[in-house]
Amino acid sequence: MEKDTRLILALDVLDSAEALRISQVVAGHVDAIKVGYPLILATGLGIITELSRYAPIIADFKVADIPNTNRLICEQVFKAGADAVIVQGFTGHDSLRTSVEVARSNNKDIFVVTEMSHPGALDFMQAAGEAIAKMAADEQASGVVAPATRPERVRDIRNIIGSDLTIISPGVGTQGGSAADAIRAGADWVIVGRSIYQSDDPAAVAAKLVSEIKEVI
Ligand code: O7E
């Protein structure tokens, strides 16, 4: 994934025509498009192939299973044309290691969720976030997911993983986080969904976010 605009679109719409229309208009403003259960359950895995003409595709399945099941899932998703798969870290090192092996053999990426961006992440996940980040570095994942809603946590996680791994950071806009703050704290990319795809002018919103990001790098 090329680091240019540093913006990733979270495309949580439910209709393939809408997904294609939005992707086409924002394509020049984003480095990747993240698709997950909402769009894929509504339209099918083939949407990954269709969208991949606009940008690299990150498949957000937050895979959280035993190593063999993680392997089977990652193989199918890469086969469908995804460039990266998001996995949960709390399942531990063996599940992650298997996912990274599959990604590496396909020349693709794995991103590991550390602490999530919503308030409920404080209930259980935050306590494990730093250990998960360290495991992601030890297992040589491509990067981690850290919350733009808590830039101080992005900074903590950056300190743990160093500069070899990347950070992709959701929670900007509708969830209250700021793109500039997340990038300043050490995120490589911010992930933005509703603020872009629910707007009347998704390209203009994306362009504005990119210029906000460019001001702080
Ligand atoms: O709030 P929005 O509309 O900008 O969408 C944010 C997207 O990021 C949405 O797809 C959500 O599922 C995802 N996300 C979070 O919001 N918080 C997290 O902690 C993690 C993710 C996520 O995408 O994880 C994998 C990158």
Image: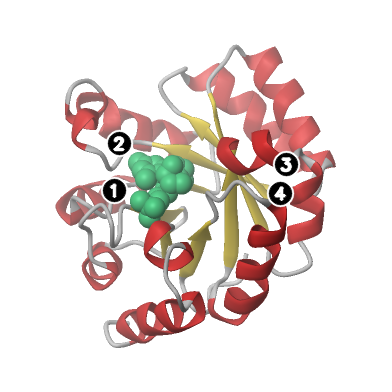
Q: For the point 36% across and 87% down, which residue is it?
A: 211
Q: Which residue is mark 2?
A: 115
Question: Dot 1: within a 10 Å radius of its alpha carbon, few (fewer than 14), some, or many (20 or more) residues?
Answer: many
From what the image shows, is residue 80 above or below residue 180? above
The amino acid sitting under disc 1 is Pro
Q: Which mark is residue 103?
A: none
> Which secondary structure, mark 4?
loop
Query: Which amino acid, by three-letter code, is at mark 2?
Result: Glu
Q: Helix, strand or loop at disc 1? A: loop
Q: Could you give the CA–CA distance between mark 1 and mark 2, rounded to whole angstroms?
A: 7 Å
CB within 8 Å, label 3 to label 2: no
On-image quarter of the C terminus: bottom left
Mark 2 near mark 4, Cβ–Cβ under 8 Å? no
- For label 1, the residue is 147
Residue denoted by label 4: 108
For marks 1 and 4 on the same chain, the one whose residue lies earlier in the sequence: 4
Residue 60 visible from this viewpoint: no
Which of pointers 2 and 4 lies earlier in the amino acid sequence? Answer: 4
**Viewer-nearest of labels 1 and 3?**
3
Can you tell which of label 1 and label 4 is closer to the viewer? 1
The answer to whether the residue bearing label 2 lies less than 8 angstroms from the nearest atom of ligand 1 is yes
The image shows residue 165, relative to residue 112, as above or below, that is below
Give whichever of discs 3 and 4 has the lower sequence position: 3
106 vs 176: above or below: above
Estimate the x, y position of residue 160 in percent, counting from the top left: 29, 45
Q: Is mark 4 within 8 Å of ligand 1?
A: no
Q: CA distance from mark 3 to mark 2?
A: 29 Å
Q: Find the distance from the CA under tag 1 to the CA under tag 3.
A: 28 Å
In x, y percent, where is residue 25? 62, 78
Badge 2: residue crowd in 10 Å (few <14, some 14–19, many ≥20): many
* Quadrant for the N terminus in the image: bottom right
